[in-house]
């Protein structure tokens, strides 16, 4: 009897026995009371359930959340700066929004500071004037943190994950009516319910499970729109923009994060065009160009519904971009989004090749060409954070970034970089203050950029900028004989400068934020810092598998160090020179180092066709029956 038939025969008597044991087991368990922890869908599971994943507790701002240490719900601690800045921006937006209704907001930490303040801002003077018109028995209406304000902001977080951001809104931002924390994942919504109860904000935060787009499409009516919509997806927010511009109220705030910087920075121009309707260029100014592409995409989606955007703050930080815009309705403003004059454009505005370097132009865009910040609003946020630094953990970085933003030239799109200018002409890189001083001496405006450390924003024309670099090259000359006649450096340096640059350092060349050494970039807070992997249902097992995959792919393009024994064995697989010429007597048995055979008799004939070896073959019959020769000598 074959093995397969034996196994089949043995399995037949076992089937009734297994059925009988299962029936007796179920009958005995049916008499016992059900245990809630082991119930699943109303029936008891026969298999033992795996132990629950360990839960970690994180405190950020005023919120305390618990989430599984496994990667089941997305959480990135690196974006604390993003969440702190969002709370600061929404607070100032609430101050403006509720101030128009005669409601004052009470921000934690500002009460004592307001008593010390001597000068009142324009907004405080207007509020004080409104308070004077109140009846003697009436008190000015105020909105505090953690309280429901009936006329306050209605906030939607479309992709809430663990609910941390929504809970922080409820605990740190005053003047809120409700906060809807939405996510499509049932596991995430379950976690949000737990965190909402943990922080005691169930009266403000409402966890909701739905597709973010469908939820926003259901709130298109003017009476059902949200005053603030926050979108922080994993990757691109492009699928949500069309619904978002319709679900935000007139004059409402729309906050959008994009973490697909590889696409926005020009690594895949076709993908950028398909998602944002613009072609990104791989250039040194790619970070600001990414901001302007996102703003253009938002405005383009809003224009379809007779709406337009007004940017309040646009930030490029770490591995993402973050924009805060207000959305308004107005047909006349929508028309001016295309051009100032309502007539056909003339073009092309440039020739096919650059007049300075002779290289072909690259066409990118379209992108947002107007200012990307509202400097008055940014000043309000900066003042609030500066006077109350203990409110946020990243207050120092917020002050540094916003200070540079207030110093940027608002009407100058994009920027140059020092290394870009110097590498083009193959000369030494000038100091930042030297180049800024030369531009100021020539009568041009110049500023830094928050998006790049060594950036230079200026209203100088390309002709003037290259004249300054030609003058700098004369002080630090390059070897012209090494330059190719077709290279950009040769063509730029072949023209004599018309502008005589002055590189003496000016006092106003060093901006205030740089003099004070304000913090703009954070150090890597942990290992493998950067974008986190997408949340997966596998939890800990999936994260462990990802870590193992990373370990296997580490240094995959680098050849590992080879052991000497392995190297010798590998070299033995290569044929000798005589084999390549076809004159080696060993035939297919030839290798780089011929192995010596056993001791031979006096009648042996030496092999002289391979000069690289001192091996002899033995005609004894043992060699023909598969005897293994000894190791050879290289």
Image: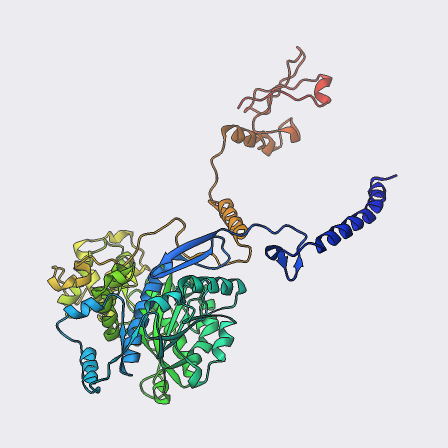
Q: Nearer the viewer, residue 618 or 503?
A: 503
The x, y position of residue 510, in whole percent, is 16, 61
Q: In which quarter of the view is residue 10 placed? A: top right
Report how many numbered discs are placed on residues in the image: 0
Residue furthest toward the top?
602
Residue in the picture at 25% in, 66% down: 402
Q: In which quarter of the view is residue 34 placed? A: bottom right
In the displayed structure image, the side of residue 391 where residue 232 appears, left or right: right
Identify the image's colour scheme: rainbow, by chain, secondary structure or one colour.
Answer: rainbow
In the displayed structure image, the side of residue 37 where residue 301 appears, left or right: left
Q: Is residue 410 above or below residue 134?
A: above
Residue in the picture at 42% in, 85% down: 222
Q: Assign the N terminus to one quadrant of the image.
A: top right
Would residue 619 be visible to someone looking at this image?
A: yes
Q: Nearer the viewer, residue 463 or 629?
A: 629
Would residue 411 be visible to someone looking at this image?
A: no
Q: Nearer the viewer, residue 228 or 270?
A: 228
Q: Is residue 424 above or below residue 107?
A: above
The x, y position of residue 28, in whole percent, is 73, 51
The x, y position of residue 51, in whole percent, is 56, 50
The x, y position of residue 397, in whole percent, is 27, 60
């Amino acid at each position: 009897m074959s093995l397969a038939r034996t196994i089949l025969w043995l399995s037949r008597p076992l089937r009734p026995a297994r059925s009988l044991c299962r029936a007796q087991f179920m009958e005995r368990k049916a008499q016992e009371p059900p245990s809630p922890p082991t119930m699943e869908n109303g029936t008891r599971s026969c298999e033992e359930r795996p132990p629950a994943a360990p839960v970690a507790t994180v405190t950020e701002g005023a919120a305390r959340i618990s989430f599984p240490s496994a990667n089941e719900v997305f959480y990135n601690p690196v974006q604390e700066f993003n969440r702190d800045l969002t709370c600061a921006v929404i607070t100032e937006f609430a101050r403006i929004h509720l101030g128009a209704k005669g409601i004052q907001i009470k921000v934690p930490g500002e009460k004592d500071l307001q008593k010390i303040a001597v000068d009142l801002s324009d907004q405080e003077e207007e509020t004080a004037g409104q308070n004077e018109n109140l009846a003697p028995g009436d008190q000015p209406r105020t909105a505090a943190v953690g309280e429901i304000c009936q006329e306050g902001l209605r906030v939607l977080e479309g992709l809430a994950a663990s609910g941390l951001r929504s809970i922080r809104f409820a605990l740190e931002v005053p003047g809120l009516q409700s906060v809807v924390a939405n996510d499509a994942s049932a596991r995430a919504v379950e976690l949000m319910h737990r965190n909402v109860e943990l922080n005691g904000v169930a009266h403000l935060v409402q966890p909701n499970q739905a597709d973010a787009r469908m939820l926003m499409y259901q709130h298109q009516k003017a009476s059902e729109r949200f005053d603030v919509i926050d979108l922080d997806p994993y990757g691109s927010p492009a699928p949500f923009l069309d619904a978002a511009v319709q679900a935000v109220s007139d004059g409402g705030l729309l906050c959008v994060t994009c973490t697909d910087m590889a696409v926005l920075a020009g690594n895949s121009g076709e993908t950028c065009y398909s998602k944002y309707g613009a072609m990104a260029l791989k250039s040194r100014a790619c970070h600001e160009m990414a901001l302007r592409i996102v703003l253009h995409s938002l405005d383009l989606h809003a224009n379809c519904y007779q709406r337009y955007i007004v940017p309040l703050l646009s930030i490029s930080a770490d591995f993402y971009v973050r924009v805060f815009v207000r959305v308004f309705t107005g047909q006349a403003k929508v028309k001016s989004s295309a051009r100032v004059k309502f007539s056909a454009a003339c073009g092309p505005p440039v020739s096919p090749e650059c007049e300075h370097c002779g290289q072909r132009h690259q066409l990118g865009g379209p992108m947002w060409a107007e200012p990307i910040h509202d400097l008055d609003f940014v000043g309000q946020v900066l003042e609030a954070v500066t006077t109350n630094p203990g409110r946020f953990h990243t207050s120092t970085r917020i002050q540094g970034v916003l200070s540079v933003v207030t110093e940027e030239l608002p009407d100058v799109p994009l920027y140059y970089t020092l290394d870009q200018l110097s590498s083009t002409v193959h000369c030494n890189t000038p100091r930042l203050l030297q180049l800024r001083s030369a531009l100021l001496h020539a009568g041009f405006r110049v500023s830094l950029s928050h998006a790049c450390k060594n950036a230079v924003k200026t209203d100088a024309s390309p002709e003037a900028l290259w004249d300054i670099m030609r003058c700098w090259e004369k002080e630090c000359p390059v070897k012209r004989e090494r330059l190719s006649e077709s290279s950009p450096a040769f063509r730029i340096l072949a023209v004599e400068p018309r502008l005589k640059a002055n590189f003496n350092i000016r006092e106003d060349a060093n901006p205030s934020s740089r003099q004070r050494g304000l913090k703009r970039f954070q150090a890597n807070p942990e290992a493998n810092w950067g974008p986190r992997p997408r949340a997966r249902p596998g939890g800990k097992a999936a994260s462990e598998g990802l870590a193992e995959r990373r370990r296997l792919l580490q240094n995959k393009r680098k050849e590992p160090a080879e052991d000497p024994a392995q190297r010798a064995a590998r070299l033995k697989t290569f044929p000798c020179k005589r084999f390549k010429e076809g004159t080696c007597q060993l035939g297919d048995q030839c290798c780089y180092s011929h192995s010596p055979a056993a001791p031979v008799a006096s009648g042996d004939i030496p092999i002289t066709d391979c000069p690289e070896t001192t091996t002899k073959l033995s005609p004894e019959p043992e060699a023909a029956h598969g005897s293994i020769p000894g190791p050879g000598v290289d």
